[in-house]
Amino acid sequence: MAIEISIQHTPNPNSVKINTNQTLFEGARSTSLKAGDETEHPLALALLAIAGIDNIFGIRDFVTVSKTADAEWDTILPQVKEVFQAVYA
């Protein structure tokens, strides 16, 4: 089944919540990583490689992506969508 994502804006203009129809992070613990952190999680690794993404927070079927203050969502979100399609193809 192809992954479906829904992007939800948050009160923080530098963060968006991405809900999905699949489990992204296994287990009951959350995953919180900053740009430059090492991880073997394919989605986290790919998201953190996008220029302008500062950190991610994920648990089960959602991930919150936060950008740096000078980055633009118009540039980042298409790349985020591509990452989901590539990782969950």
Image (spheres, rainbow, N blue to C red):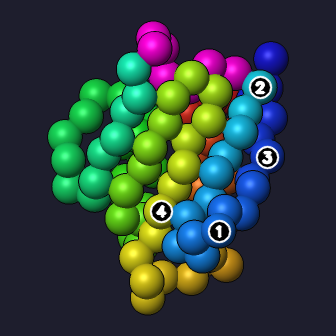
Near-viewer residue (11 or 54):
11
Q: Is residue 37 magenta?
A: no
Question: Quick check: 47 left or right of 41?
Answer: right
Question: Quick check: 26 left or right of 16?
Answer: left
Residue holding disc 1:
11
**Cβ atoms at labels 3 and 4 below 8 Å apart:** no
Q: Position of residue 33 (x, y in %)?
A: 30, 45
Residue holding disc 2:
21
Pointer 3 or 4: first along the chain: 3
Q: Position of residue 57 (x, y in %)?
A: 44, 44
Residue holding disc 4:
66
**Cβ atoms at labels 3 and 2 below 8 Å apart:** no
**Looking at the image, which residue is at 56% across and 41% down?**
63
Depth check, mark 1 against mark 4: the one in front is 1
Residue holding disc 3:
6
Please state which amino acid type lies under the numbered disc 1: Pro
| Residue extending farthest bottom | 70
Depth check, mark 1 against mark 3: the one in front is 1
